Image: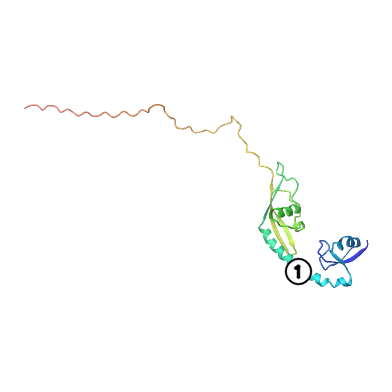
Amino acid sequence: MAKTEVILIHPIIGLGAESDQVKVAAGYARNFLLPQRLAIPLTQSNKRRLEALRQRRAERESHELNAMTELAKSLTKMTLTIAVKTGDDGKMFGSVTNGTIADELKKQFEVTLDKRKIHIEKPIKGVGEHEVEMRLHQGVHTMLKVIVNSSNPMPAPEVAAPGGPETEKRGKPRRFEGKSEAPAPAAEAKPERKGKTAKA
């Protein structure tokens, strides 16, 4: 396959950044890189543009470093909550991937991040709290707290069947109908009569 050399004028993931001189397939350069203005042919006249491209690249990388450093500080304080479907045994259907996390970051916090900057050794397949490494830039890494919850509705509380044992209830104080008997009034003592004195 024929190869050709080009100078990149925009960063291309997996290929290089502006000012890089790279060899690519002639058809790839002719059909994609050159028409999209992502690269220019490697010629003597175009080589004069290298210094300007290097300067532009340095400014862009400095701006990205500052932006990613600030983003790292914000992500450290965030807690991303993701709802998933689970079975009756609590096991998840499917898994949470770096793509899932990137989508939820944009939806919940309006943070747009390339999913390749979200490093997961293997997809998350369990509910609970997880720490996910974020490789935002060369030398800029941070951790994001991700909480995976079940989206299944909570089971309804059990209702006691009718006729079951009832808890003992305290009765109200018994009321007596009719008039209550009042204690009889104490008898009044009669004054003692004095006898007549005998005449001498």
In the rendered view, does 150 fall on the left or right side of 37? left
Looking at this view, name the residue that lies furthest to the right. 1
Q: Quadrant of residue 6?
A: bottom right
| Residue 96, horizontal then vertical, whole percent | 74, 50
Q: Is residue 21 above or below residue 118?
A: below
Q: Residue at position x 67%, y 61% from top?
A: 73
Relative to the observer, which residue lies in front, 59 or 191?
A: 59
Describe residue 141's horizontal placement relative to residue 40 as left or right. Answer: left
Q: Is residue 56 left or right of residue 25?
A: left
Q: Is residue 106 above or below residue 19?
A: above
Residue under the point 73% across and 66% down: 63
Residue 58: give x, y in percent of width and height: 77, 69
**The one of 149 and 90 positioned closer to us in this rendering:** 149
**What's the residue at 76%, 67% (across, down)?**
60
Q: Is residue 14 left or right of residue 190?
A: right
Q: Dot 1: what SS?
A: helix
Q: Return the x and y of residue 194 as percentages of the image width and height.
A: 15, 28
Residue 119, x across and y down, in percent: 75, 57
Label 1: how many Cα within 10 Å (few below 14, some 14–19, many 20+): few
**Count of number-bearing discs:** 1
On-image quarter of the C terminus: top left
Q: Quadrant of the N terminus?
A: bottom right
Q: Quadrant of residue 113?
A: bottom right
Q: How is the image coloured?
A: rainbow
- The three-letter code of the residue at mark 1 reads Glu
Camera-nearest residue between 74 and 54: 54
> Residue under circle 1?
59
Query: At 91% from the left edge and 62% from the top edge, which residue is drawn?
Result: 26
